[in-house]
Image (cartoon, rainbow, N blue to C red):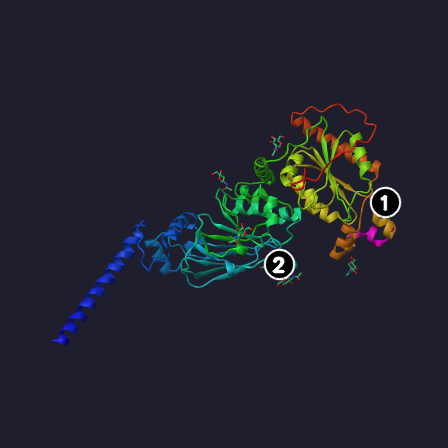
Amino acid sequence: MKKMKVEKLYRLMIVFFAFQVICFIFFIRTSTRHQEHETDKPTKVMGSSSSALGRRLSIQDGVSKQSLKMSSTTIRHLSSNPTLIEPTIICDRSHPLYDWCNLKSGSILEPNTATFFSRSSIHPLKVETIRPYPRKRDNKTMSNIREITLTTELSHSPCTIVHETPALVFSIGGFTGNLFHDFNDGFVPLFITINTLFPDQDVTLVITNYSEWWYGKYEAILPQFSNQTVINLDNQTVSHCFPSVVAGLISHGPMTINPTLIPHRKSFLDFRALLEEGYQKCLVWPPPKIKGRPRLVLVSRVGAVGRVILNQDNVIKLAQEEGFDVVVFEPSAYTYLCDVYRLMNGSHAIMGVHGAALTHSLFLQPGAAFIQVVPIGGDWLARTYFRNLAKGMKLEYIQYKIQPEESTLVDKYGKDHVLIRDPDSITATNWSALHNIYLRGQDVRLDMARFKTCLKNAYVKAKKLMEHQGLHVRRRSKIKKFIRPQVFTYTYGVM
Ligand SMILES: *[C@@H]1O[C@H](CO)[C@@H](O)[C@H](O)[C@H]1NC(C)=O
Ligand SMILES: *[C@@H]1O[C@H](CO)[C@@H](O)[C@H](O)[C@H]1NC(C)=O
Ligand SMILES: *[C@@H]1O[C@H](CO)[C@@H](O)[C@H](O)[C@H]1NC(C)=O
Ligand SMILES: *[C@@H]1O[C@H](CO)[C@@H](O)[C@H](O)[C@H]1NC(C)=O
Ligand SMILES: *[C@@H]1O[C@H](CO)[C@@H](O)[C@H](O)[C@H]1NC(C)=O
Ligand SMILES: *[C@@H]1O[C@H](CO)[C@@H](O)[C@H](O)[C@H]1NC(C)=O
């Protein structure tokens, strides 16, 4: 009796089990056909929120080339379930300046290890690491950039925060704090990357080597790149899920945007429009009034920083005689960019000795004059960086290359020293000499007769811009005495 009962029970269990299997298969088929059907079965790879991400993903990435080269098993998967695209990682490491990688599947960030895992399983396993900063060959700088890992390894960990936009991961740990580098290695590549990989699409910026200073400094323009809250990857304690991840920024070279490499042919003028829109929104003191004369901003280096114009008052007087309204701008790391934007946007010329502060010329309007004073040994830097910028921004670039007599290096070494006669032979191989001798150890004393020609040229351009803006330019009256110019520092909390 007992034995029969057990046998019966056994049979019942087998039938029941078989029924379960059939139900299960049936469930799989129907659930994949009807995407809205969301039951919490353990076989489901994605949780309800991330399956929503999966759907969005299939729209973005479903027709990628990668999905065409798939194994027969995944093809079967795909045909019955269009949301299950093959999660894969593609990397472009072919460029001398930068790498970028894309994990093309729903992803989860494990913040302690800075690793993005896939939400769907795939074989074979693929793991890519990347330091997301566009100075790939600069080993010293790159060693300071946090390494990010992308892996196709499956993670079932729950998503604490679900983002609906792809993550764009990059580091600001390189030369952050130097205005030139913040744009050259940061915002310009960010602009290029977003417009190349995510045209007409919002992203979430995920930043490593984050700094509060950086956020404060660029708070006005960050919303122009993304509508999502910026994520500081380094201090996260919870998991974040994204529909996909890109790590790394694309660069077109020093202060360069090449429109032919970007889908909608975006240029530096589009970059400027983005800045204008960002700085429109910030609350600032009204900019200084235009006094019927083109305004020249003299970017002044103060202190023992090198490349100081020793006869600055003479230069100011000369510029005033030539018809400019001169303002002196003394920037610092804490300069409030909203104010500087208005100053520059309402000016018609800028001048200064080669240095990071000339990056503020990004805020000038196209057509403004840009006088770069090039010290001995600074040819390559001047040419590579600000000439590119001026060209991209459609500024009227005027280069003033100093003569040996205008440099304090002649006082130190004499006119016939190799340092003066052939600086290129030294700067080409010795970066420490470039930095210590030519950039930090040199001040300039401009030759008034030579520089006058340069100012006259700039005045013509500046006047033209003013007229183009519909502003009346007063006739030049002979200025006899030196007018002490306004000095702008624009530091936070100080006016
Ligand atoms: C930088 O590092 C890479 C790989 O670690 C090495 O191949 C290369 O020679 C290094 N470059 C310099 C300039 O040290
Ligand atoms: C960036 O983060 C990495 C990893 O936390 C760290 O080793 C590196 O020193 C940081 N770099 C800077 C410039 O803070
Ligand atoms: C942010 O949202 C506004 C309004 O919806 C939109 O016009 C703008 O393009 C968005 N910006 C980005 C960077 O996606
Ligand atoms: C991480 O840092 C950001 C920016 O400094 C800050 O706003 C945020 O509250 C921090 N988050 C955590 C979890 O500490
Ligand atoms: C920049 O100048 C233009 C006119 O020249 C003006 O329309 C615009 O409002 C200015 N931008 C800001 C942010 O002040
Ligand atoms: C590079 O320049 C420095 C001066 O800044 C000098 O001390 C050093 O000897 C130079 N190195 C070489 C290899 O010439």
Residue 124's image quarter?
bottom left
Residue 272 pos. (x, y %): 60, 38
For disc 1, the marked residue is: 405
In what element is the residue under mark 1?
helix
Q: Give the range drawn in magenta.
A: 415-423
Identify residue type, mark 2. Asn
Residue 276's image quarter?
top right
Residue 76 pos. (x, y %): 34, 57
Q: Is residue 243 left or right of residue 2?
A: right
Residue 136 pos. (x, y %): 61, 56
Residue occupying the point 67% across, 25% down: 471
Residue occupying the point 65% across, 52% down: 175
For disc 2, the marked residue is: 144
Find out if the beta carbon at label 2 lies less than 8 Å from the nearest ligand 2 atom: yes
Extreme residue in the left direction: 1
Q: Can residue 110 be seen in this view?
A: yes
Residue 429's image quarter?
bottom right
Q: Which of marks 1 and 2 is nearer the N terminus?
A: 2
Q: How crowded is mark 2: few (under 14 residues within 10 Å), some or many (20 or more)?
A: some
Task: Name the residue nearer the viewer: 469 or 144.
Answer: 144
Identify residue type, mark 1. Glu
Extreme residue in the front direction: 493
- Residue 145 higher or lower than 330, as above or below: below
Residue occupying the point 38% across, 50% down: 52
Residue 213 pos. (x, y %): 61, 48
Residue occupying the point 54% across, 56% down: 234
Task: Name the residue nearer the viewer: 256 or 129.
Answer: 129
Q: Does the magenta stretch include residue 157?
A: no
- Residue 249 higher or lower than 270, as above or below: below
